[in-house]
Amino acid sequence: MQVSNKPSPMAKIWHIVSMIPEGKVYSYGKVADLAGLPGRARLVSKALRAAPPEMALPWHRVINSQGKISFAEHTPPFIEQMQSLRAEGIIVNRGRVKLSDYEWQPDIATLVLSMPY
DNA sequence: CAGGTGACCTTAA
DNA sequence: GTTAAGGCCACCT
């Protein structure tokens, strides 16, 4: 039986992002995939914009599929994201991180158990 | 309803 | 290794 009403796509995205561990990064597209929303990477960026600040979502750990920060260089949000990543020990060069070193490898079992839906 | 936009992605050169 | 073009989809005028 269905226990709860359908979770909004945004709520699923927030949940996945909240599971990215400190010191790791993940791409918009893969967040969308794990949230059950394949092909909707752009919705992830919208969800991050809409997230209430008080939920302290680790939005800075979400980057694009090439390992780059998606804000334009030298803009305030770009600089903020780069500093947040470095504060966790992540090496950032020219706005880019090495995915082979820092990409999150999600554990599916843990993920499923964490899902409230 | 049509057209524009974006914290994207994949492919091809 | 890079960049550019086309594709994509939800959302907003």
Image: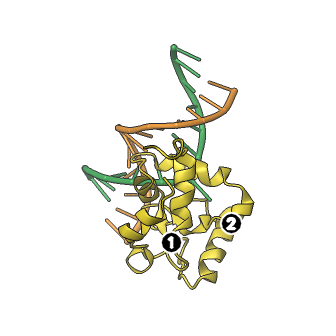
Chain colours: A yellow, B green, C orange
Q: Marks 1 and 2: in contact by CB < 8 Å?
A: no
Q: CA distance from mark 2 to mark 1?
A: 23 Å
Residue identified by numbered label 2:
A56
Picture coordinates of residue A98, whole percent (x, y): 43, 76
Q: Earlier in the sequence, mark 2 or mark 1?
A: 2
Identify the mark at residue A96; answer none if there is no mark: 1
State which quadrant residue A112 falls in: bottom left
Q: In the rendered structure, the residue with mark 1 lies on which chain?
A: A
Q: Nearer the viewer, residue C11 or A37?
A: A37
- Callout 2 and callout 1 share a chain: yes
Is B5 situated left or right of A39 in this image? right
Q: Residue at x 54, y 63 (%)?
A: A17
Q: Residue at x 49, y 76 (%)?
A: A24
State which quadrant residue A72 falls in: bottom right
Q: Is B4 rendered above or below residue A79?
A: above
Is A40 situated left or right of A7 in this image? left
Q: Is A12 rendered above or below residue A87?
A: above
Q: Quadrant of the N terminus of chain A?
A: top left
Report if residue A66 is visible in the image.
Answer: no
Q: Is A88 rendered above or below residue A31?
A: below
